[in-house]
Image (cartoon, grey):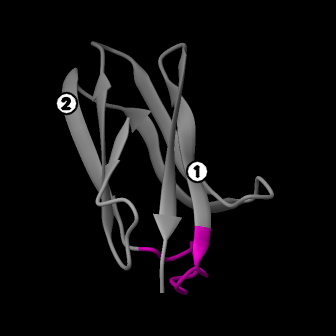
């Protein structure tokens, strides 16, 4: 997974690839491991995918400045990216 732009002051796009029939389960987590925003829980078609995180939590509130981890599983593989959110 690749996050760009990084650092970000608003939106960052995360690109990832899914194999045929694989399940993608991806979320954004804070430094203490709490889920900030769920991004994907589904089976997607194979190929390249991306999502844009707007720097908000599940309630729609803007997150604080800091480091966030985009992590999860695609099929059997663990994936991870780090995002520095600036305000």
Seen at 48% across and 57% down, the residue is 83
Residue drawn at the location 60% of the way across and 62% of the way down = 67
Please tell me whether mark 2 sits on a helix, a strand or a loop. Answer: strand
Mark 2 or 1, closer to the camera:
1
- Asked if the stretch drawn in magenta spans residue 42, the answer is no
Q: What main secondary structure does the magenta stretch of the protein show?
A: loop
Q: Position of residue 45 (x, y in %)?
A: 23, 25
Check disc 1 and report its element: helix, strand or loop: strand
In the image: residue 80, left or right of residue 51? right
- Which residue corresponds to mark 2? 48
Place of residue 7 in the rendered image (x, y in percent of width and height, measured from the top left) = 40, 65
Q: Quadrant of residue 9?
A: bottom left
Numbered circle sitting on residue 69: 1
Is the residue marked by circle 2 packed among few (<14), some (14-19), or many (20+) residues within 10 Å?
A: few
35 on left or right of 21: right
Q: Nearer the viewer, residue 23 or 70?
A: 70
Picture coordinates of residue 32, whole percent (x, y): 80, 58
Q: Which residues are magenta?
A: 55-66
Q: Earlier in the sequence, mark 2 or mark 1?
A: 2
Residue drawn at x 19%, y 30% is 48
Left or right of 73 in this view: 29: right
Q: Is residue 12 left or right of residue 29?
A: left
Give the position of the N terminus as an image quadrant: top left
Mark 1 Cα-neighbour bin, 10 Å: few <14, some 14–19, many ≥20: some
Q: CA distance from mark 2 to mark 1?
A: 20 Å
x and y percent of residue 53 in the render?
38, 64
Q: Quadrant of residue 24?
A: top left
Q: Residue at x 54, y 13 (%)?
A: 76
């Amino acid at each position: 997974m690749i996050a760009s732009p990084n650092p970000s002051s608003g939106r960052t796009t995360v690109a990832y690839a899914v194999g045929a029939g694989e399940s993608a389960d991806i979320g954004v987590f804070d430094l203490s491991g709490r889920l900030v925003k769920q991004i994907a829980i589904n089976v997607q078609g194979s190929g390249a995918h991306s999502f844009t995180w707007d720097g908000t939590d599940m309630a729609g509130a803007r997150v604080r400045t800091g480091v966030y981890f985009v992590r999860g599983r695609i099929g059997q593989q663990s994936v991870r990216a780090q995002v520095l959110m600036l305000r």
